Image (tube, coloured by chain):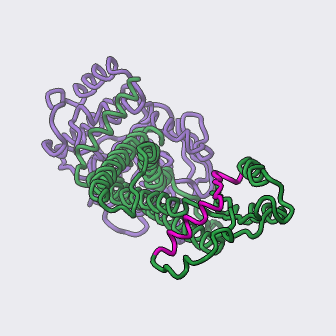
Amino acid sequence: MIRLRDVTKVYEGGTVAVRDVNLDIQKGEFVFLVGPSGSGKSTLIRLLLRQDTVTRGVIWVAGKDITQLPAWKIPFLRRSVGTVFQDFKLLPNKTVGENVSFALEVLGRPRSVVGPQVKQVLELVGLNDKGDRYPRQLSGGEQQRVSIARAFVNRPPILLCDEPTGNLDPATSVGIMRLLDRINRSGATVVMATHDHAIVDAMQRRVVQLDNSRVIRDEMAGRYETGEIPFQNGGRHNGDGAEE
Amino acid sequence: MNRLGFLAREALINLRRNLLVVLGAVLAVFISLSLAFGALVVNELLRINTLAWQDGTHIIAFLYDEGQDGVATGAHAALLDEVSGWQEVANVRYFDKAAAWAEYQEMFADRPEQLNIDPSVLPASIRIELTDIDLYQDVQFRLASQSQLIRRVATFGEQIEQLSSLSTVLNLLGLGLALVLGASAVILIANTIRMAIYARRDEVSIMKLVGASNWFIRVPFILEGMIEGLIGAGLAVATVWVAFRNLRTIGDSIEIVSFGIPNRFFLTWGIVILLFGAAAGVLGSVLGLSRYLRDEDGGRPVMVDRRVLEPT
């Protein structure tokens, strides 16, 4: 579903964000990207969304080389990849229902399809009674649920999540993870960058650890930290919310 | 159709939500285009009035008397016929000796001592009005070739040239002013719309994130820009039109200045200004959006020092 070969990203000024990353993610997998701030997790997410271009290497998403994708085809890539962010990225002037339906309206779906699909996905995230509320009228957890609903309303095969629980308390985070797990079990591939030890340890899914711009661990059913491969900088990574 | 409806709805909702910024853009268009349109009207007024000053006799050809100096009877009438057929000539009149005397008497009415002359010495003449005053030298040259019939050709050459160049300068000045103000309108609109887009850059970035195409994002902004441009331009046209009508009412009492700009001028230029306003709005939106849209797709490729890419 996702394949990275020798992917390197260097930003202006010479900062190397990721270096020589090789990764294969199969359809239906749930993968955690872990590592300290500045290790390259968010850059990988941005590269997979073509919000950034690789400096070297190739990325295939659903069989397509997205590094060679012309600008006009990028929206088609993004329609097949749902995204969830730490800061929710909801439109404050639109209601919950409008925020979710917006993702279908940009695709030109007819109203007869948009209405039932939005209702269905709001039920999935447990917000079917809050469709008329504005984001400011919701709690952080609820806002993240709206964000997940928007990302999934189009039933994309891939869901990219960048610190989705970074702004949430542990109890709310568990709810969000249950939701993402449910989406994953429906067949979607989920890639999630996180700092949250508890969640990674509890979920026991594949863990890809980055440090200093490189992949230093790729472990099936892994934990956040492992005694075998210690963090090189010796720092603590306790989900402070900050990301590169 | 569903998509178009959605885009139009988005544009209208955004206009309502960003009323203050919209007002700023409309005012920018209104002020710039009012000044530009005003400059065009003033230019037209100058053109009409310099044209009016240019009316009248441009060339006088004084003739030898018929039956004398080898000039046959009927030669004056034949010359009049010939000259009236020339393309450069708008109008030609024959002044016989009696008319010349009458004019002389009128000219020197307040200096009776000058009237003590033999009227027969005053020559008959033809008075020529040109279609274009710049052509006076051509006509003067053609008349000069008839030296057996024409005693002397008098033109208002210097005055004509001065008037002509004054008119050209005024025209250029007016058009230049309109152009500068028009360009400043585009820049003002582009800036204002850029500010509006900057205020909504998160929205643009979210639209990109959910897979909206660049055109899908652009259309509501372009519609907004177009509506703002049209409203501003419409107000400008209406304001200049109303101001001109009031000016004409006052100006009717000033006889030396003509305010006779035809309605056709206002109709034609009004449409041009409206189209310009709409186009400036569209251009401003497209210019304002392009950078944000490019940045959301990874921006321009970054030039990297090869040494950074070498294995560490």
* Bounds of the magenta segment: B87-109
Report the chain shown in purple: A
The residue drawn where x is 48% and y is 56% is B291
Report the chain shown in green: B
Is residue B96 magenta-colored? yes
Which quadrant of the figure contains the C terminus of chain A? bottom left
Is residue A170 magenta-colored? no
The residue drawn where x is 24% and y is 37% is A145
Quarter of the image for residue B7 reads top left
The number of discs equals: 0
Q: Is residue A202 visible?
A: yes
In this view, A208 is above or below B71: above
On the image, the x and y values in percent for residue B176 come to 51, 65
The residue drawn where x is 55% and y is 41% is A72
The residue drawn where x is 16% and y is 46% is A136
Determine whether, in the image, residue A64 is placed left or right of residue B2: right
Along the line of sight, which residue is nearer the eye, A104 or B5?
B5
Along the line of sight, which residue is nearer the eye, B139 or B17?
B139
Quarter of the image for residue A177 reads top left
